[in-house]
Image (cartoon, helix red, strand yellow):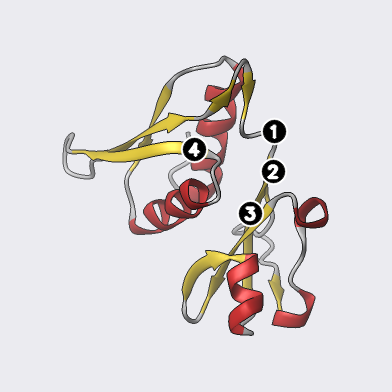
């Protein structure tokens, strides 16, 4: 578990939890993690998440979503990473699977989905894709 890249850590924990069909997973808490999880919840990829006070940092308990036996999350991909940042202007923001997925963008107005960034006409760093 790499503490240098909390976004990759978040995506890996969720991906592994979905693959073994866990009901919930625990993710180290941070402000950025909370914003990304709220985007995932708003777009219907996870059921819910709650902050659990454990040591100093705390952790989020993320309840994964399944439709029957199939997980709501099919894939997760980290786009911008510490060694290679990916920035896009608003006109070039990617559409994930022709609109079926979601891009998470870090903009000057905060972390938001690619759809919201296009509506507000702001670009930024493309953090990850989920579909």
Q: Residue at x 60, y 18 (%)?
A: 68
Asked if residue 89 shows in the view, the reply is no
Which residue corresponds to mark 2?
131
Q: Is residue 106 above or below residue 130?
A: below
Which residue corresponds to mark 1?
74
Task: Pinpoint residue 32: horizontal percent, then vertical percent.
Answer: 41, 58
Q: Earlier in the sequence, mark 2 or mark 4?
A: 4
Q: Residues within 10 Å of mark 2 (few under 14, many from 20)?
A: some
Q: Quadrant of residue 81?
A: bottom right
Of badges 4 and 3, nearer the viewer stands 4
Do residues under tags 3 and 2 come within 8 Å of each other at their CB atoms? no
Q: Earlier in the sequence, mark 1 or mark 2?
A: 1
Task: Pinpoint residue 30: horizontal percent, then vertical percent.
Answer: 33, 52
Mark 3 and mark 2: span between their CA atoms?
Answer: 10 Å
Do residues under tags 1 and 2 come within 8 Å of each other at their CB atoms? yes
Q: Quadrant of residue 57?
A: top left
């Amino acid at each position: 578990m790499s503490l240098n890249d909390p976004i990759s850590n978040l995506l890996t924990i969720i991906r592994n939890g979905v693959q073994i069909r866990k009901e919930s997973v625990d993710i180290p808490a941070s402000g950025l993690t909370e914003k990304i999880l709220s985007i995932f919840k708003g777009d219907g990829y996870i059921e819910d998440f709650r902050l659990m006070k454990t040591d100093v940092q705390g952790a989020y308990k993320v309840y994964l979503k399944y439709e029957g036996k199939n997980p709501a999350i099919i894939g997760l991909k980290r786009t911008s990473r510490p060694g290679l940042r990916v920035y896009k202007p608003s006109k070039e923001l990617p559409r994930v699977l022709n609109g079926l997925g979601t891009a998470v963008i870090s903009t000057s107005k905060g972390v938001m989905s690619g759809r919201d960034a296009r509506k507000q006409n702001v670009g930024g760093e493309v953090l990850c894709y989920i579909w």
